[in-house]
Image (cartoon, rainbow, N blue to C red):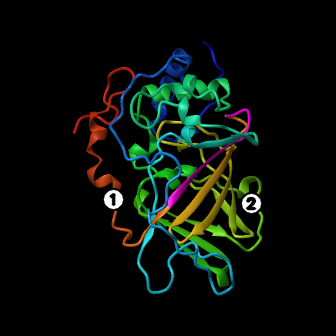
Amino acid sequence: MTAPVRKRMSGAPPPAALAASILAAALAIGGTSAQAQIAPQTDPSGLTGQDGTAASEPAPRLANGTPNLGRVPGEKGAWAVPYITNMAARVISVDGSPVAAPEATVSGSRGPRSGSASEPHIPFLPWSAALYDYNSANESKYDPEGYCMPPGGPRMMATPYPMEIIQLPEQERIIMIFEGATHIWREIYMDGRPHPEGDALNPTFLGHSVGRWEGDTLVVDVVGFNETTWIDFFGHPHTDALHLVERFSRPDKNTLRYEATIDDPEAYAAPWTVAWDIPWSPDGELLEYICQENNLYLYHLTDDFGQPIFGNR
């Protein structure tokens, strides 16, 4: 199978010298299924977030009446972001049309990765399907997050570390702080500004976010991503043309509902939307997290030619 290859930006892990071999291998196995196994991970089935109590408290609100997506004064707690390893299993629509039970065809977050062949509902382009098959076959060997790079994009909302949301109405900002990725944070501008254009839009891991309220739902429009990240742990790729539309709502005190539309016309033939719930952890808090401190497995990785990627330590 021969597929057109889209050139990746330089600077993304793996090292630039390996990029050509990765894409070449992707072409070579473009239509094959991956049989690599991954270690069991905690990945809630279905939409999660309910705490099992008979009745949930209503969602809190700020003094100005907008939903409070974070803590109320005097309480502890944080959002317990779940581990969503394969977003193909969380698709609710493609190009606006509902998708029923996508997990029925997807291999799931545990067990064999079957690549694009098991995800007919994902509107891959030929090159993105080939690269996804390669990423699947090689597990996390070339996963940028495995090299302590920020997850970026929707993956930040699917990486299992606590998260805090801080709303600053007077400054027209919303701040999200994540324990993972070494306490990376994102800033959502709520002052009505547009996205920068042209050279003024500097590609970053988390992109440029502007938000607005639609009733009780926070809608965040994000552009300006670099190509360094994967969409998820399984390795769905994206380009710098990625346009993300996120929707945050809090139906009750214990649940943050997250929905994201992935629109990347250079990687996918149509937009696709994923969704899941994030539960509130009353005793949760952000702890120190240093990725590089214990990332020793990198020194055991070899490239496609059997050579150490980082040399021996």
Badge number at residue 196: 2
Residue bounds of the magenta highlight = 268-278
Q: Amino acid at mark 1?
A: Ile
Q: Amino acid at mark 2?
A: Pro
Residue at 51% of width from left, 36% of height from top? 235
Q: Is residue 190 above or below residue 42?
A: below
* 271 within the magenta span: yes
Q: Is residue 258 above or below residue 231?
A: below
Report the residue that reaches farthest toward the front.
54
Q: Is residue 63 above or below residue 260?
A: below
Question: Pointer 1: residues within 10 angstroms few (<14), some, or many (20+)?
Answer: some
Residue at 41% of width from left, 32% of height from top? 139
- Is 173 on the left-hand or right-hand side of 82? right
Q: Quadrant of residue 112?
A: top left
Where does the image place residue 213, in percent across and percent down from the top left? 73, 69
| Quadrant containing the C terminus in the rendered view | top left
| Quadrant containing the N terminus in the rendered view | top right
Give the CA distance from mark 1 to mark 2: 32 Å
* 277 within the magenta span: yes
Which residue is denoted by mark 1 in the rendering?
290
- Is 23 on the left-hand or right-hand side of 222? left
Where does the image place residue 29, in percent across and percent down from the top left? 51, 16
Question: Pointer 2: residues within 10 angstroms few (<14), some, or many (20+)?
Answer: few
Q: Nearer the viewer, mark 1 or mark 2?
A: 1
- Dot 1 falls on a residue whose secondary structure is loop
